[in-house]
Amino acid sequence: MVNSSPFESEQELWDKGSQLHSAWFEFASPELKNQYRESESQRRTLALKMLMEAEVRMHLGDGEFASFGFCTLPSLSNGPVRIPAFIFKSEAVAVDWDKAEVTGLGRRFEDVRVVRLVEGANENDDFAEITSDPAGAKALKPQSRGGRKGYYLQSCEVLKELYAEHPAYRAWSAGRILEAFNERYRLKFTPPGHKAIAPISERTLRDYLAQYRQESAETGSN
């Protein structure tokens, strides 16, 4: 990338970005968007919206999408700044899609907007060319990096519910909790009228548990 691009500055990138309250749909996968459009029940629509938000948040955490907003905590920024990708990986951070706010880890960003990075770009680049046109999503769609890390946020919700109902599960290994976890996972996230979603593997759940416990220890959450 060259530095003479008209979208070089954070202000210009923010100007061209999609507002957070619509980014969950614009930047979601075509498959989920099609299912959302065809949804005929409120319950299914809400479940799909949750999946789309989690998918976009995953890509923000991976640095494949970038976000910009006005930092209001711990101090007020002079203009829009790039939000670090790690912010979106933390369970302690809340994303309010409707208010376009990201809050947590002692920081708050308001009027947040999302942009799509070109392939090969990352947040260390001097410039990241973007497009806010969903029609360009196919050409710029990030390549899969393997694994099921995109379902970590949903898995955290399941773990919270299971731990609240069965405190003894907190000391259980991934192998012991796997059956109960996947039963709740499928019940919670399978859209009504659709084939049950694929279960989380024991290896993936083991990784999720390690990350979840580490984040819980760091934030003091239960």
Image (cartoon, rainbow, N blue to C red):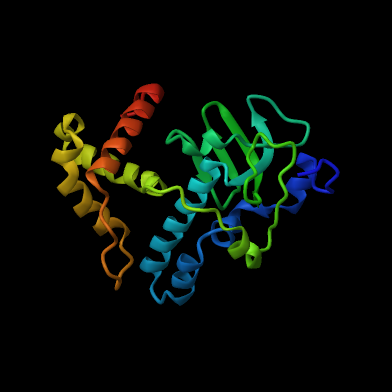
Q: Nearer the viewer, residue 126 or 24?
A: 126
Query: Residue at point 83% right, 47% down?
Result: 5
Q: Nearer the viewer, residue 127 or 60?
A: 127
Q: Quadrant of residue 204?
A: top left
Q: In screen coordinates, is 170 left or right of 193?
A: left
Q: Is residue 65 above or below residue 193?
A: above
Q: Nearer the viewer, residue 161 or 159?
A: 159
Q: Quadrant of residue 4?
A: top right
Query: Residue at point 62% right, 63% down?
Result: 139
Query: Residue at point 45% right, 76% down?
Result: 38
Q: Is residue 215 above or below residue 39?
A: above
Quadrant where the image shows the C terminus: top left
Position of residue 6 measured from the top left corner of the image (x, y, whole percent): 84, 48
Position of residue 171 measured from the top left corner of the image (x, y, whole percent): 17, 29
Position of residue 106 measured from the top left corner of the image (x, y, whole percent): 55, 26
Query: Residue at point 59% right, 49% down?
Result: 99
Q: Nearer the viewer, residue 66 or 37?
A: 66
Please tell me how many numbered marks the rendered image carries: 0
Q: In screen coordinates, is 151 left or right of 183?
A: right
Q: Is residue 77 above or below residue 55?
A: above
Quadrant where the image shows the N terminus: top right
